[in-house]
């Protein structure tokens, strides 16, 4: 349930960072990671990869490169293109190895000290790491480390990795890393860089994606790539090799790729929301094309909750593939009844109340002459707080729609995510407090339907959910959390990570 | 044939403005205009209107307001949201009347002195004006005015309006304006502001659009709005009153709207390209919904040049409505085979060669698993230079398409526009130098087809083109220029407008 | 009576430019001008010259160069070094001829449209001009020109020059310039640039300085320089040739220097305040070294108003030479009893009241251990409003001074200047409302003395003032204005120059 | 031997920070510290104090405040006034306690991670510290701490303080601090802030100054101030209480000031260069007024190395007090023969070679009419590399001086400082490689003389140097280093502190 600009839900206003407890400092972001080993222009390729993964995080971006002797870092708030399209920035990141990280966008203040990749000078050399996911015992570990004399620079959960590695009694980097990983709980896909190797890690449940690719031999000398999604391989012309497996560590150096599996084999629990919304439609995730899955979800929705109508309209842009699938299955025309304004950008901050009250109109406008007098099926991917859905419906009605039926390509979102997707507190989730009929009234539609959990599983994987051992992590729909929520069990006031409020 | 970021054609690299002859200084931009009379928050409403008209010009934007005593101006390079979402900027534009102007985006240097609305202190008071269109005798007039002792501030063609008004021997503003209009030739939709009235003007041929709207009574006190398109009425909640007619001057003051028609009635020649590409799909232009027209063009294309295929793919985003029409008529699935990256923005400037060579991939990516092995019909709105089309086709082929057929929702663009749409010199137009078969080879498609001129007229207006008196301006397709190209007839070296190259 | 940062008087807070009548828009600045003809790196040399003349104006700076074909302009708010130390800016100003202008600093908003050199495209070619001084009939002329249809771009008095030239019926630039000059009244030293020549002009009274210099032959090819002061020759290694004479036009082209004197010879009235404060101490002005003059004024002061004391302390930095002269004549030690903080800069804007109330302490601090228990003679150059003097005295008393005697190296400032030095309205001048005894009480000193007008004349020129035909302009001390104050005689509400308030 | 902008020596060009070994990353800066306890507007007062101490460091500045609950930090490159004159910045630093730090200016890249005060979240709460001085065993300690698993954020020597405190086994902050201090060697004056107290520390030799002051009772509630110099007390209206003693820790909390002396008493070795150049002339240092000392040095110089001459000219601004003393003793006139341009600022970066070659002229200009034909005694405070001295002499000769005699108010600088003043490597010091006669030839003077070491001691303290136990640290003149140079004894390649080169 990400709430970035593509989301159907407006983000809560974030207070100026007077206090920075775990929640407000956003340690639980969704993110994208990318890395290149053994290729010319490694930092430029990483910038491209991060650009292709921009949908996974728009708050900040960073790259660390290694030139054979020293590490080079550049981290900045804002989009990848804002920072890394400057030739001087790329030139300041020399070397044939680099890793990068995209961080999730917020409207409030974000501090540079939290932007990844994190870097540390260990006794044995430099080490950089980017993390996609979220740890569930980071606060507990942090407290213990501080007690021991460790000084934390950031308020991210990810920093515990570097301290655990720093104090490990093992001697090699990989052994120290395994030592650290055995102490953390939660979801993590990591890309790390040392002087000797690039390392990829995926947690035992494989909640977040991580893939291995290879650059074409002549042009880029057959270097290796790690990335969150296949769309980041496409942009640099790399070919897909394989998924990094749940519970696998891949160590990539000049001898090739070495695989280490320090955990006993267990059933994976990949995040099903990656299919519904988060991954890019042109990515192939866990072997399945995302676009195809979304069309199948739309078709399933049409079968489960058909309604007589004149046209099917996606809420742009994320609702488009499901709407195409719905329209085809329902035999209704697919139409662009809502136009998205591509120029809203990051900067339209609504200077006056009269503009602010226009709300969603800055981003979307109704195609009046198309909609007027018609029965409209609106297709969207999810309902989080419900505030944007209500505005969209209002706009469609004001354009003269005769009926408005909303169809959602996910089950009701009833629980928060603690594995790397930022969701509101549970009591802010519309579906946690209301049944579907009540939600329909609140949003103002003539009918509302969500896909069933089994329908979703069928569309994604071809079989229904196995309640005994679910094939995916679907905690946001079911409350079935596969990994213990350790920190959540601690007293709430325990969660302040730093006494420093930095401007 | 606009060449902004939504265009299928990359803009020619613009030289650092060492020389600023008429061409490089872009006096021939396409633009958007907006004005509000008698409403609270006039400048904020104008910012919204310009935001809705952002597709008509992304280079720069400006607003002039009048507070009953003084005029206030803010003009800046960049998008409307970059500048006018700052509450301090809006606060610096007090008053119940305001006009604004969007100017077409270029990648090269643009100088502030050319940003509109232009403002002048006349003997009788302040006067501001924004101009959409292009004059064809501006250079000739400018030369005569300079000879008389007039000092030009800008290199825009629009500045002749203010000097002609300043030196007119008539006494009222409106009489002076008419005096000026009778001396200019070309395409113009104007919005002007004085202490007494807001004025809208459309040239006798009505080449560019201009509409009149009204704000809802209670909220905004029934103030009046002038705008280039209806989508700008929607965003401020105004209702459509009527088109300003070709050859009409509307003078809006506290007594209402007065209409003046200083020219003999003649047949209008509205720009047909506004339907094909330039206007927003949710606008109603000259009484016809643009989205509907584009679907009809797509259907006509399917009838005229059917080809066996597996799927219809739009070149995003402008090709979407025509592709929907084409797919429905051809009975083929409509699919998002090309994904547009929404984060490219203005700032991704490709720091290295290895990134630059990836070219179009920063903006678009192919949906590989959808396209591989399929016969694809690509639908786009126009081909100007052909360079982007070639890259798109290359990308689609690299994704494994079995066949690529391109269908264009306009006739071949064989001539430059001189009435307000920036097009390359004629010899840069692919269709000016090649027949369709040669174009297909250059672009690399299995087949290429354009809609016929009569097919286009039927889709737009329901009847074929009348060669004796064409119903629209279609000079870019036919070379039939309705308004004399006076300056073009002068010697080329005559066109340098200023000896000043400002940094 | 300049009130820049070196001034003993704080500038009145300037309102945000909601209204821009003549006074608030500061058309009456003191300025510096510089020009180079026929030398490599002309713009770089001009930047240096303006840097040496920075004390004459810190508000803004501009340079226009000519490359043999086109003119190039760069103008910016701020110090010369802020803008023209950027290699890209200098590179954007190619050519072997350039002129530049420094504009006086204000704390309020200043608009770019008022920054000089002004540039105009005349029928016969480009023309740029920088103006030091102030016209006394500019408003009257402006009104007539606007009535004729001239459109003014700025609110500076200087713009009337370019319009008068543009509409002149003469054919050559020089004849048109003379035609224009004959219509203006006031003080002006001009440096102008055309494609054929660099032109220097000094008004018939020679109120403001202007000198001619020459670059060394081998290095800079013997090019010519025009400048406000000799210190600007020194920095570029040019030698002093001669003063441009009052009422003289020098036309410098590749044939050398041509002198034109279009007025009947009359007695000059050079501004005596240039000696007291405005010119740099290392300049030679009207044949006399400024530093030497200031020491002589100090010595004269000591003779005129001796007082028993322990040490002589200058108010830094402008009071130093007079204090040295005073101390030597009085046989007292010269000591740095007040330390100036060199880091105050333009940016220390006092964020809180508690800092604001410390006032002068940010700029100056008392040397406590030196001053405590001593009888101190403070030497300063002038008293305008008196507010800073009062704070300085307070600070010196707080540091423990036994007695504080203030000696001023100019006569009481009783009248405003209208010839190019920004002074407060007359009723804000302390000396206009109080006799010396009252001023001493207000400022809080044990004694206060000003140099006599005859003492000043003797120190400057060796002879007393000739009341019949004073040798200098001393209007600020005597009210004897040599040039008629035409605009001042018009009704005050007539002075609004523009209805536009630009942000 | 600081080499900031007031220095007679240009700084060596600093390489873009491709490598950041200890030397290039400037851990050995001279700095200023300031702190306030128990006063309203603590951050604003600290900004003022840092402003008064700006001469001690212009590279960067930072403030940490404590509001009773959380700490707030703002650190930035540039001058105090550039950053802390912004009301929003001060408002972001709430609380009644604050400490601040000025860091020495360099022309090269400086990274934010090195700007102080450093802040750490310890187990027992927040801790901030600012350090003036330089440690001589910081690299050795750092290596041991990294080995233990400590992660360093900066490359400053000062960071070892916080890690040593973090890992100390003692329980109270003060005990942990003493534990840390006992492990470090070098020069340090510290100001630290915890939730309970403000702490001041001076190393056992008292190399750097630190003083205690008190705010006036009614206005600022009698809060306490720590500062490097008395001039910082004057600006906030605080009274001088006493010097913090060498080897003393002062703990200031709401119960008042507690003194702790954890070391055995030993003879102090205050830095004698603080008197010659570094401290501000209006400060009272170690009980002695700096201005008075400098005049006495000048007088002693005149006695030691008299030469027949016409005038005494200071090299501005640091040479002025010594020149006054010299002139008075020698019976010669004191004259401003060199004018300093106050507008050079940080930004005049000399865009072209022709400007660069003018070198010193941007900063200084000769007062030609004063100097021509005269025998000039130039008085300056020190000669480091000698390059600026040579340019100054060249400029004075070019202005026509008959003879140039240089007198230096310190002995020859023959050794580098390792206790907190940035000096070039020893082989770059002119006096390390040349005798006085050779130096005179290189600089181009007719005669050159330095004050003798005993003359200096007499002027400062009234007695000659005791070679057995010198009363001051004078290592830069004598090579007698009171504190062991531990790190310097280690192999040079050992000194790389971080593998990260941050942009």
Image (cartoon, coloured by chain):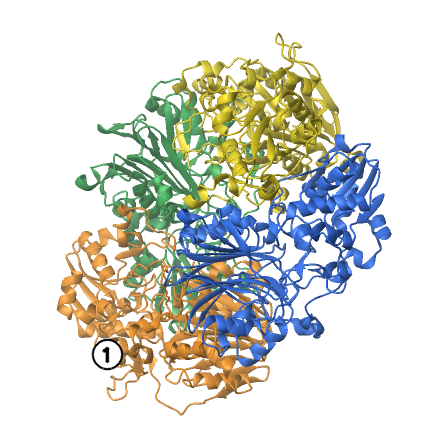
Chain colours: A orange, B green, C yellow, D blue
Question: Is B368 left or right of C328, judged from the image as shown?
Answer: left
Where disc 1 sits, the SS reads: helix
Query: Would you say A15 lies left or right of D136 here?
Result: left
- Between A243 and A18, the one lying in front of the other is A18
Which chain contains the residue that carries disc 1? Answer: A
The mark total stands at 1
State the image coordinates of residue C27 (x, y, percent, origin top left). Answer: 50, 26
Q: Position of residue A402 (x, y in %)?
A: 14, 56
Is residue C176 positioned above or below B2 on the image? above
Above or below, A186 relative to A426: below
Dividing the picture into quadrants, the one containing residue B447 is: bottom left
Which of the 4 quarters of the picture holds residue D15? bottom right
Q: Is residue C234 above or below residue A170?
A: above
Residue found at x 40% / y 15%? C491
Left/right of residue A435 with respect to residue C6 in the rendered view: left
Location of residue A473 with respect to B9 vertically, above or below: below
Q: Is residue A68 visible?
A: no
The front one of D438 and C303 is C303
Query: Disc 1 designates what residue?
Result: A478
- Residue A27 visible: yes
Instruction: Check disc 1: other Cα within 10 Å, few if <14, some if 14-19, many if 20+.
Output: some
Of A437 and C320, the residue lying toward us: C320
User: Percent position (x, y) of residue B253?
Assistant: 26, 29
Image quarter hosting the C terminus of chain B:
top right
Q: Residue furthest top?
A: C468
Where's residue A371, x and y in %? 21, 55
């Amino acid at each position: 349930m990400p709430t970035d600009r593509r989301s159907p839900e407006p983000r809560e206003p974030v207070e100026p960072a007077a206090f920075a407890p775990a929640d407000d400092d956003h340690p639980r972001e969704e993110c994208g990671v990318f890395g290149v080993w053994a290729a010319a222009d490694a930092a430029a390729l990483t910038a491209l990869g991060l650009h292709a993964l921009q949908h996974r995080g728009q708050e900040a971006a960073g790259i660390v490169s290694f030139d054979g002797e020293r590490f080079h870092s550049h981290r900045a708030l804002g989009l990848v293109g804002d920072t890394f399209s400057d030739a001087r920035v790329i030139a300041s990141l020399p070397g044939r190895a680099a890793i990068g990280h995209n961080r999730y966008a917020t409207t409030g203040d974000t501090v540079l000290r939290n932007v990844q990749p994190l870097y540390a000078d260990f006794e044995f050399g430099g080490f950089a790491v980017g993390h996609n996911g979220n740890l569930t015992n980071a606060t507990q570990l942090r407290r213990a480390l501080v007690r021991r004399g460790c000084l934390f620079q950031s308020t991210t959960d990810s920093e515990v990795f570097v301290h655990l590695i720093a104090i490990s009694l093992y001697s090699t980097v990989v052994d120290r890393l395994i030592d650290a990983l055995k102490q953390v709980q939660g979801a993590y896909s990591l890309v790390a860089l040392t002087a000797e190797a690039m390392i990829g890690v995926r947690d035992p449940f494989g909640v977040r994606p991580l893939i291995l690719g290879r650059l074409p031999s002549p042009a880029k000398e057959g270097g290796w790539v790690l990335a969150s999604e296949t769309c980041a391989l496409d942009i640099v012309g790399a070919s897909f090799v394989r998924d990094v497996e749940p519970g696998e560590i891949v160590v990539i150096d000049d001898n090739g790729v070495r695989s280490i599996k320090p955990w006993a084999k267990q059933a994976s629990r990949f995040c099903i929301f990656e299919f519904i919304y988060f991954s890019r439609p042109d990515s192939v995730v866990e072997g399945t094309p995302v676009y195809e899955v979304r069309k199948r979800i739309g078709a399933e929705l049409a079968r489960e909750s058909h309604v007589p109508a004149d046209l099917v309209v996606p809420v742009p842009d994320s609702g488009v593939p499901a709407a195409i699938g719905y329209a085809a299955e329902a035999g209704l025309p697919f139409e662009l009844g809502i136009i998205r304004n591509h120029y809203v950008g990051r900067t339209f901050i609504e200077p006056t109340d009269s503009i602010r009250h226009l709300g969603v109109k800055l981003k979307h406008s109704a195609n009046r002459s198309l909609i007027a007098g018609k029965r409209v099926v609106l297709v969207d991917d999810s309902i989080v707080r419900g505030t944007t859905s209500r505005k969209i419906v209002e706009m469609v009605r004001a354009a003269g729609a005769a009926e408005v039926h909303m169809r959602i390509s996910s089950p009701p979102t009833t629980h928060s995510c603690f594995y790397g997707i930022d969701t509101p507190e549970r009591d802010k989730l519309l579906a946690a407090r209301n049944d579907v009929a009540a939600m329909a009234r609140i949003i103002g539609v003539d009918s509302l339907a969500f896909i069933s959990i089994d329908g979703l599983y069928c569309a994604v994987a071809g079989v229904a959910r196995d309640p005994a051992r679910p094939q995916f992590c679907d905690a946001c729909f079911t409350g079935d959390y596969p990994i213990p929520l350790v920190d959540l069990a601690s007293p709430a006031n325990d969660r302040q990570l730093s006494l420093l409020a930095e401007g």
